[in-house]
Amino acid sequence: MKADPKGVLTGSHFFDGDHACCEGALAAGCRFVAGYPITPSTEVVERFSRRIPLVGGIFIQMEDELASSIAIQGAVWAGKKAMTVTSGPGFSLMMEHIGLAAITETPCVFVDVQRGGPSTGLPTLPGQADMMQARWGSHGDYEIIALAPNSPQECFNLTIDAFNLSEQYRVPVMFMMDECVGHMMERVVIPAADRIEIYPRRYTKLPPGEYLPFKPGEDLVPDMFKAGDGYRLHVTGLTHDYQGYPNMTPEVQEQLVHRLVNKIRLNAEKIWRFEEIDVADADVVVVSYGITSRVAIDAISLARQQGIKVGMLRLIVVWPFPEERIRELAVQGKAMVVAEMNYGQIFYEVDRCARGKVPVVLAGHGGGTVHNIEDIAQRIAEAYQCRS
Amino acid sequence: MSVMNELEKAALGHPKVSDISKHPMDDFMRMDRMPHIWCPSCGIGVSVNCFAKALEKCQIPLDQLVVVSGIGCSGRVAGYVKVDSFHTTHGRPIPFAAGMKLANPKLKVVVFSGDGDIVAIGGNHFINAARRNIDMTVICINNFNYAMTGGQVAATTPEGAILPTSPYGNFETPFNLPFLAESVGAVYVARWTSLHIYNQTQSMVEALKKPGFSFIEIVAPCPTIFERQQKFGDGLDRLRWYCDNSEINHSAKTKDVDIKLRDKIIVGKFVDIERPTYLDAMNTHFKKRLGDKYQPYEG
């Protein structure tokens, strides 16, 4: 279906990634945001709180991130599209409800505008060290989807995609911005509403009595119901059967958790998104995402001037991880550099997928500012020298 | 014992099996989930029964009703009531319920959970939802301990009570729940014990009809753990004790109704005031500030 024109601010704008993310959410049909103030994400909710009374919906500033991250799930089961917005310390508090959204298959979006950590760390300065937390932060086995924009325009476009993916697969989607992308101002073009595709909520067509709320379809995703429609059903964070009733046996645990994992793993090829630049003739491939991918471009130019054939694989969807593509590049003998603003998170994923076939070098640092171009170029030279 | 067949029973004037196989609670409870997990003479089931009666009295359409629970013995209420029901995380049913109510104001939202869930781990959510006067009814079963995990000391445990994590007796000052609820803005506050089934049903009716944040504390026996650890006898002994030691006083000041281990318990309806709900306040305010550009929010 097409976007509701009421929420689409069609035109050419000049604003930052946080504002673009807010407009993306409105265009995607998000009509409920619960949040707690935290730098550098506050501009997203400030804009939403100003816009939403005129679009029709709710913004509520909750008492903390625990409340925000579960209020959105109540709103979703009552029929709204919803998201919450935070940064590292708040993201840590939200982990409990990422697990709840995963096990109850509640479609919703968690925006994390990453700053330097751990703990209070660097409130106003960038980091990219929440990538593994986004993937593994809540206890237990589950899969999520995570996207990493590298420009305000992508903050707009990919926020819509984040909502669409969350509805299609009924998973919480992590929108992993960083302080630089969140605060950089660029042109953002918002198309007309009829040019924006929206994945509608997969409500069941079965009547009460015939519908089983957690019985999956062919794509392993069950259809939804919403409160107040007369289904009178149960949703629990306990391990549950097709009916939604608690059933704490190893058999039902296996049936449920295996499906929660497989609905993403077996659909991963459809979810993967990455951008490749000059990879075909490259001896070294730089893997990067978010703001670091834009710094890495300059490092690649520098290395090419020095005679090294370098390409780039930019991750747009980070989770599920594009394992096969990394494996293919490794088999082709392309040494790899992983440029990210941390001391090795996606680096270990790339290294795992390369399976020792090529050297994988980390170009990382602790956050607070973007990389020095020369540092990435240096790592590229190292990878080139020790390639097989 | 002789076995009568259907015809013999009919001839003797007994109702047919098909007539009596329908329990009065069938329409409200998920009978396919019985037996429930609650212990004999636990107070939670009593309150669920009262709740069903209150709904019947209010004539609330069950399709519009949502019951939200957290974690613990009382957290299991959501799983047994045959309405749209959500069993959430520990301490967080109130913000989940707030999200639901604000997303669809047509829903009637009830939070049914325990003392640990609502005022200890979820205390921050409790005080803020009451402050905002979000339209919901919170029914808090207070059994003075964390019964599901074996009876550890709680934020409501009276001083002196012996429990697995207060083996020498509790020395902390417990919450006085009606005082807390009133001080943070709840528009309706009542307390009853599991003995007061008529009164608690009536309070549930009033709370369900009351726009805004209404709160009912039910003092309930936990015969398996709390009462046994204090050597208070079985559930029936406890109900007898409630009978002899409860004092109904609707005009009591909530600051004076704190619960001591062996003192009388003051029960009653303590607060019943008017205050705009969150959504009413929001709509009024935005209409005033934004004029005709603002369409009142209805979900």
Image (spheres, helix red, strand yellow):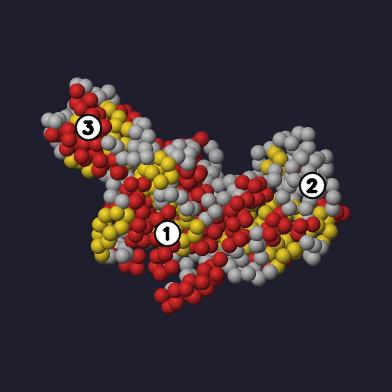
Q: Residue at x 14, y 31 (%)?
A: A306
Residue identifier under label 2: B235
Other residues around mark 2 within 10 Å, as few (<14) / some (14–19) / many (≥20): many
Which residue is most to the bottom? Answer: B292
Instruction: Estimate the x, y position of residue A214 in percent, counting from the top left.
Output: 46, 49
Along the viewing direction, whichever of A144 and A214 lies nearer the viewer = A144
Name the residue tied to disc 1. A46
Alpha carbon separation for disc pair 1 and 2:
54 Å
CB atoms at circles 1 and 2 under 8 Å apart?
no
Residue A119, numbered label? none
Percent of width and height locating residue B270: 75, 63
Quadrant position of residue A118: top left
Q: Earlier in the sequence, mark 3 or mark 1?
A: 1
Q: CA distance from mark 3 to mark 1?
A: 39 Å
Q: Chain of mark 3?
A: A
**Is residue B85 toward the left or the right of residue B177 in the image?**
left
**Closer to the eye: label 1 or 2:** 1
Mark 2 element type = helix
Q: Residue at x 36, y 46 (%)?
A: A179
Q: Residues within 10 Å of mark 3 (few under 14, many from 20)?
A: many
Give above or below for A12 relative to B161.
below
Locate residue A56, reporting x and y percent.
42, 68
Q: Is residue B75 visible?
A: no
**Residue wearing tag 3:** A377
